[in-house]
Structures are given as C-alpha cells and as structure tokens.
Amino acid sequence: MSVNLPFILIAAAQLTLFESMLVALVSSAVQTLPNPGTQLSAVKLLFNVNTMGLAAGGCALLWHRHSLAGRPWSGSLPLIASCAAFFLLNTFPVATIISLTEGASLTRTWMSIFQLSFPYYLGCTGLISIISAISQQVSWIMPMALMPVMGLMYVSFRRFFSTTANASPSQSQQFMTAAAR
C-alpha cells in the first residue's frame, strides 16, 4: 500500500493519460527513494516506477474510454473498471516477483496481497468517487478537503500492519481475526 494511491486515482480521473502517468511515475520514484543511511536500489526503483506507470496507464485508459460513457451507470462503470484495472496491474506484478524470489505459490501470494490491500484500494476508490462527484459541482478546493481523510486511512492501515508485524504469530492471527469481523 502506498500513500500515493489516492493521488494517482485522482490524476487518472481528472487529468489526461500523459499527465496521470507523469504523476504516477514521479510519485512512485519519490516514494522509492531510500531513507537516510541506506542505498538506492536501481532495480527496486525501476520495478516500482514501471509497475506504477503500467497500473496508472491502464487505469487512466479505462477511465477515459468513450465506450464506457453514456451507459446506464456511466459514472460508476468507468470508476469501477479503472480502479479494478489499477488494482490488478499493480498487485499482480508484485505478487509475481515475490513468488519468484521466495519460491512461493503465485496464487497464494496474490491472495495474501489481496486480503491485506483490497480494503485500502476500495476505500480510496470510494473517496475518489466522492471527489469526482463534488469536483463536477464545485471548485477543486472542496474535494481537497477529503485529502486528510485519505491520509488518516493510510496512517490507520500502516499502524495496524506495524502492530501485527511486531506481534507474535498467535497475536497476529488474533489481530487478523478481529479485523475480519
């Protein structure tokens, strides 16, 4: 999960294909920059930038696809299709690399990523839906007021997963069971 997800989805909804890909490429490159005292991994940087560019490009293409417009739920269909494409195009390459490097099952790896990140993607998709609807009625400043909600959602997920990462395996299972309820 990355903090740049809502911004990339907003870019796909509000900007051109080129502009939304530029936002995705720059934000993923900045996010991949190492912390002080650690070295930059060129392979990690290239993988992250390319994966995010592919996902953002697929998302923006579906968002702006003219054949989806004018359908009965024309506002929802492009949003659902583009966010689903972003999710698949972003998580599948990551799951593939993890399964290859760790010798794990691709299906199990992707399902694990799905379980952990799908609520975040779904929440961001809902917020983007709200932002898109509001931005058609008022200036762009009003939807920006929802950005703190996105930030809090991201911090909440980070805190939850850092707590489960530091817990014993039995405590982690209890956290995941409680979260599933």
Image: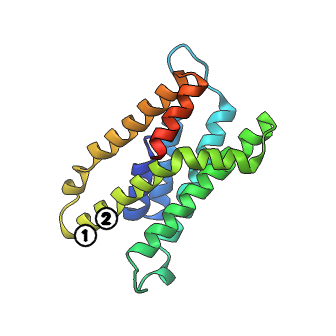
Residue occupied by mark 2: 132
Residue at position x 40%, y 81% in the image = 73
Looking at the rendered structure, the secondary structure element under dot 1 is helix
CB within 8 Å, label 1 to label 2: yes
Residue 136 bears which disc, if any? 1
Residue 156 in picture, x, y percent from top left: 38, 36
- Please say whether residue 2 is visible from this viewpoint: no
Residue 35 in picture, x, y percent from top left: 51, 21
Decide which of 51, 46 is in the foreground and name it.
51
Residue 173 in picture, x, y percent from top left: 56, 33
Residue at position x 51%, y 69% in the image = 81
Residue 24 in picture, x, y percent from top left: 49, 49
Q: Residues within 10 Å of mark 2 (few under 14, many from 20)?
A: some
- Please say whether residue 74 is visible from this viewpoint: yes
Q: Is residue 121 above or below residue 61?
A: above
Amino acid of disc 1: Gln
Asked whether, in this view, residue 111 is left or right of residue 104, the answer is: left
Looking at the rendered structure, the secondary structure element under dot 2 is helix
